């Protein structure tokens, strides 16, 4: 039986659309999303796929986030209590703000998990991840690096530009301050985990290297490591989640693994077959439902083991 034409493969679910999109389109989007090419170059490359029967509307509809797909836990779920909280960041942007979500049934204290967004501010997908963390029984806190600019603007392109405009070192200090704030929070048992995606994965690696006595367990999803001179401080444990097709991030892994071994750090790495960078993000066609579910099950089990 012949394969259906590309246009017939569109779907209202992000994961179902992946079969329609050539791998090079995902690679170009990754380059664009991380500032390696500009929008004009990205669009020009996409247009070359027209000869293969792909319309620009199909490609952009699949590659660009559709956040209506990303809500797995509603903000008014009775099992969670979401709110916002500010925290001091004297070495960063002076003040930070984030999305604080606690289990409704919480009495006393529970372990806490810092949830770190990608390179575009606190978008709806990451807020939903924070709610998932709270549903699993943890105090979740997801800071927004864009707080001093008014917060996530509602679209990723503008969010990326806003985040690039900020001092990177101050952003890092904001997340270090957020980790300290959360660990000392009245609802936190004193055990702190962190999970982050892309830029957020880098921040988790950075926390492991700069405040190893603050972070009790870290789960970086497709994040690059901290600067090499810092890695000797890492103790772990780390649960490192990588995607097989993510050549950009994976290129840093061999050296990072050598440094983790040299530091005597505890770590486990999982490489998810045929998965793209961003495979956990359920708002785009990069989403791989089976791999994302497996990675999340491993994440929750990891926190259960190390934050109890």
Image (cartoon, rainbow, N blue to C red):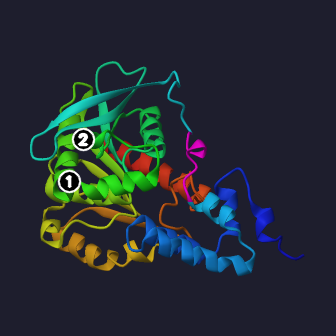
Residue 11 lies, with reference to residue 191, above or below; the image says: below
For disc 2, the marked residue is 148
- Comparing 101 with 57, the one in front is 57
Residue 89 image position (x, y, % from top left): 14, 40
Looking at the image, which residue is at 63% across and 58% down?
61
Looking at the image, which residue is at 56% across and 78% down?
45
Looking at the image, which residue is at 42% across and 71% down?
38
Q: Is residue 95 visible?
A: yes
Residue 55 quadrant:
bottom right
Q: Say left or right for 61 vs 77.
A: right
Residue 238 lies, with reference to residue 19, above or below; the image says: above
Residue 205 image position (x, y, % from top left): 26, 60
Q: Quadrant of the C terminus?
A: top left
Residue 206 quadrant:
bottom left
Q: What type of secondary structure mainly makes up the magenta span?
A: loop
Residue 202 image position (x, y, % from top left): 30, 60
**SS class of the residue under badge 1?**
helix
Residue 222 image position (x, y, % from top left): 40, 64
Looking at the image, which residue is at 77% across and 63% down?
9
For disc 1, the marked residue is 172
Q: State yes or no: residue 10 in magenta.
A: no
Q: Quadrant of the N terminus?
A: bottom right
Residue 84 lies, with reference to residue 123, above or below; the image says: above
Residue 2 lies, with reference to residue 79, above or below; the image says: below
Q: Say left or right for 297 vs 252.
A: right
Q: Residues within 10 Å of mark 2 (few under 14, many from 20)?
A: few
**SS class of the residue under badge 2?**
helix
Magenta-colored span: 64-71
Residue 242 quadrant:
bottom left
């Amino acid at each position: 039986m012949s394969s259906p034409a590309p246009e017939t493969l569109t779907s209202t679910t992000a994961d179902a659309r992946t079969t329609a999109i050539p791998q090079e389109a995902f690679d170009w989007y990754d380059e664009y999303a991380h500032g390696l090419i500009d929008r004009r170059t990205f669009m020009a490359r996409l247009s070359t796929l027209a000869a293969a029967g792909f319309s620009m509307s199909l490609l952009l509809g699949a590659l660009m986030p559709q956040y209506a797909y990303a809500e797995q836990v509603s903000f008014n779920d009775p099992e969670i209590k979401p709110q916002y909280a500010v925290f001091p960041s004297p070495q960063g942007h002076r003040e930070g703000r984030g999305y604080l979500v606690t289990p409704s049934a919480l009495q006393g204290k529970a372990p806490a998990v810092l949830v770190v967004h990608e390179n575009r501010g606190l978008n709806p997908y990451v807020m939903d991840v924070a709610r998932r963390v709270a549903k699993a029984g943890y105090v979740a806190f997801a800071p927004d690096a864009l707080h001093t600019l008014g917060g996530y603007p509602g679209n990723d392109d503008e969010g990326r530009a806003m985040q690039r405009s900020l001092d990177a070192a101050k952003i890092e200090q904001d997340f270090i301050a957020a980790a300290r704030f959360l660990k000392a929070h009245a609802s936190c048992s004193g055990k702190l985990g962190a999970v982050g995606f892309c830029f957020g994965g880098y921040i988790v690696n950075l926390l492991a290297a700069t405040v190893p006595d603050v972070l009790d367990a870290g789960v970086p999803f497709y994040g690059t490591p901290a600067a090499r001179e810092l890695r000797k401080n890492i103790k772990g444990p780390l649960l490192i989640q990588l995607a097989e097709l993510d050549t950009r991030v994976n290129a840093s892994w061999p050296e990072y693994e050598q440094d983790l071994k040299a530091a005597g750090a505890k770590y486990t790495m999982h490489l998810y077959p045929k998965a793209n960078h961003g495979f956990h993000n359920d708002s785009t066609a990069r989403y791989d439902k089976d791999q994302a579910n497996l990675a999340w099950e491993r994440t929750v089990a990891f926190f259960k083991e190390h934050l109890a």
